[in-house]
Amino acid sequence: MADDKLSISVTKDESLSKQNPVEDQTNESLEFDDSVLEKIVAITVQEVDGIIEMKGGILSAIQEGLGGIDLTKGVDVELIDNKAEINLSVIIEYGKQVPKIFAELKKVISQNLKEMTGLDLRALNVRVVDVLTREEIAKRQSYLEENDQVERGY
């Protein structure tokens, strides 16, 4: 059993993850769907001071327009040689030091990925797509709350 190997892989297609990944008695496999890794990263990013939100693409906008929530918007994870390469699109708070935010993102994402999945962080690429002042954040929050109340009939 000392020669047993554990391989970690990420699948993009659910049908692949349902296949038996163990091909012989000496190898084992642990697979993560890419959406699981993206969700781990998205939740981790929310813990970092200065990040207002993630910025998703057209599919996220459509999903949210239909009343859904895209928890992984603005997050793309690619596995290369069993190491995660992560691309983020974020909106930050005006006045915050972006290099410090980047360093904190790298630290917590690397730590959480390693603890939860055993994967190492290969690269972190952060694209700042907008910056908002506290006033803009307050207006945006107020607008979202008002729309939520209208949708619920209050």
Image (tube, rainbow, N blue to C red):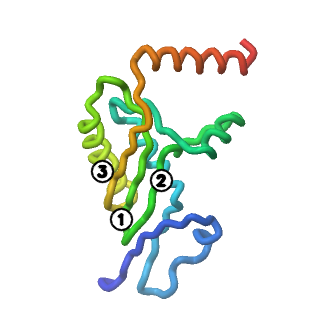
Type of amino acid at the residue the image marks with label 3: Gln
Element class at badge 2 = strand
Tell me, yes or no, whether the two marked residues, 1 and 2, touch with CB atoms within 8 Å: no
Disc 2 target residue? 76
Residue 67 in percent (x, y) is at 69, 34
Left or right: where 47 falls relative to 146: left
Q: Dot 1 corresponds to which residue?
A: 83
Q: Nearer the viewer, mark 3 or mark 2?
A: 2
Q: Position of residue 83 (x, y in %)?
A: 35, 65
Separation (CA) of disc 1 from disc 2:
14 Å
Picture coordinates of residue 129, whole percent (x, y): 44, 37
Q: What label does residue 111 carry, if any?
A: 3
Q: Is residue 131 left or right of residue 144?
A: left
Q: Callout 2 environment at 10 Å: few (<14), some (14 to 19), or many (20+)?
A: many
- Disc 3 and disc 2: Cα gap in Å? 18 Å
**Quadrant assignment, res 89:** top left
Few, some or many C-alpha atoms within 10 Å of disc 1 (few <14, some 14-19, many ≥20)? some
Q: Tag 1: residue type?
A: Lys
Quarter of the image for residue 78 reads bottom left
Q: Earlier in the sequence, mark 1 or mark 2?
A: 2
